[in-house]
Image: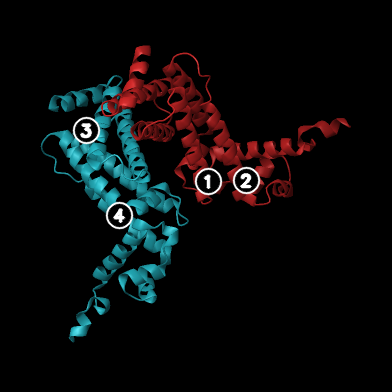
Chain colours: A red, B cyan
Amino acid sequence: MTPQASTPAYRRLGVEERRRQLLEAALSLFAHRAPEEVSLDDVAEAAGVSRPLVYRYFPGGKQQLYEAALMSAADELRNCFDEPREGPMLPRLSRALDRYLAFVDQHDAGFSALLQGGSVVETSRTTAIVDGVRRAAAEHILRHLGVTGPGPRLRMTIRMWITAVEAASLIWLDEGKQPPLEELRDWLVEQFVAVLVVTARRDAQTDALVGTLTAEL
Amino acid sequence: MTPQASTPAYRRLGVEERRRQLLEAALSLFAHRAPEEVSLDDVAEAAGVSRPLVYRYFPGGKQQLYEAALMSAADELRNCFDEPREGPMLPRLSRALDRYLAFVDQHDAGFSALLQGGSVVETSRTTAIVDGVRRAAAEHILRHLGVTGPGPRLRMTIRMWITAVEAASLIWLDEGKQPPLEELRDWLVEQFVAVLVVTARRDAQTDALVGTLTAEL
């Protein structure tokens, strides 16, 4: 191996490593521009490879690359909620939100484009990916709460809160990232408790849960 | 005029009247099927007119018809929140929610398709129409609350609640319209108060508002 062969621009990568590199390049482009403003040439340039190489890995072109990048972002988002199931519940939720909000902060424009579905490459398949993340977040939360058979009212409350968190993230990006992340996080946790308390008035399962949560405070 | 000329199928309508008739037909089709499953032939058949006539009114074809139907639905939705500004605040919100939920109930599948953006004719323009309704709802609420210069925390709270209401509507349709509409409405009003109370802890403007609202209870 000559020294030149190991400089980043010409480095030979394994298939998986190359794929990951292309996805990273795509994600960081989608992070700051709407998908319709990113071309395969941009991705090739950002990754320091040729356009044909990008096509070799993503023969479906931009739509395939976009979906793969979306899946990879979805995996990252899912991991945000992967918190050890120990210690008091609300601090766990705070830590998960910290990771989620850091992701939002880091991917800003790409995150908005992703969730608002204003993209030209939007299809029911990409919508399904985003919905999968929402469902995963709801399941994580229910598991942390120790609920196995959530009733409709509890499930609806959790899903509404998740949507409200999403809306808050988009508005937060829109408003120049105000209020500060720590305040936003605490505020969202407090809203979580508040909406559960409201549901507890009409649902015994939620009422029992709220008992456990408020005993922690 | 012969009697035949006045039977519905062959009735001559004025331009505005015909346009409205076609939109109504389209809306009622979109109400029970996703937009991509509705063809111009279906609309022509439902309205009892020929396909060329539909094209004469909507030369842009399905995309134009879909957008026009969306605008008309958006107008209807906006009207839901048009409530006289008199009497206590929370009953006003209840009445607006009653009208909104009746719209959701009546347009079910079309409402889901509209809001979930899973449609093939989804464009940033249709997204903008839906966003316009959300913004209008937020403005209506702030006007009812008598707020003229809403700060970022109050605005964010209202917008989050509106998104949560939307999510609740979609879940409600998804879950066979459970719980009953009256319970859903009361629950949403209670959540409205609860999230404002949480925001009031960190925002003087919201705190003053909550004082007024809870004095009503």
Tell me the number on the disc at residue A65. 2
Nearer to us in this view, B100 or B127: B100
Count residues near mark 1 (Cα–Cα under 10 Å), then give few for <14, some for 14-19, many for 20+.
many
Please give the count of numbered marks on the rendered protein: 4
Query: Residues at badges 1 and 3 in contact (C-beta under 8 Å)?
Result: no
Residue in the image at 61% along x and 42% along y: A68
Residue occupied by mark 1: A126
Q: Is residue B105 above or below residue B21?
A: above
Q: Is residue A44 at least partly visible in the picture?
A: yes
Amino acid type shown at disc 3: Val
Count residues near mark 3 (Cα–Cα under 10 Å), then give few for <14, some for 14-19, many for 20+.
some
Q: Secondary structure at mark 3?
A: loop
Query: Residues at badges 2 and 3 in contact (C-beta under 8 Å)?
Result: no
Label 3: chain? B
Residue in the image at 31% along x and 31% along y: B157
Amino acid type shown at disc 2: Leu
Residue occupied by mark 4: B73
Amino acid type shown at disc 1: Thr
Label 2: chain? A
Q: Is residue B196 above or below residue A70?
A: above
Residue in the image at 39% along x and 74% along y: B51
Label 1: chain? A
Q: x, y (%) of residue B84?
A: 14, 43
Nearer to us in this view, A96 or B108: B108
Q: Is residue A48 above or below residue A90?
A: below
Using the numbered discs, state the Cα–Cα distance from disc 1 to disc 4 in whole angstroms.
26 Å
Count residues near mark 2 (Cα–Cα under 10 Å), then give few for <14, some for 14-19, many for 20+.
many
Q: Earlier in the sequence, mark 3 or mark 4?
A: 4
Residue occupied by mark 3: B147
Do pointers 2 and 3 mark residues of a single chain? no
Work out which residue is located at the far front of the displayed protein and give it. Answer: A149
Instruction: Name the front one of labels 1 and 3.
Output: 1
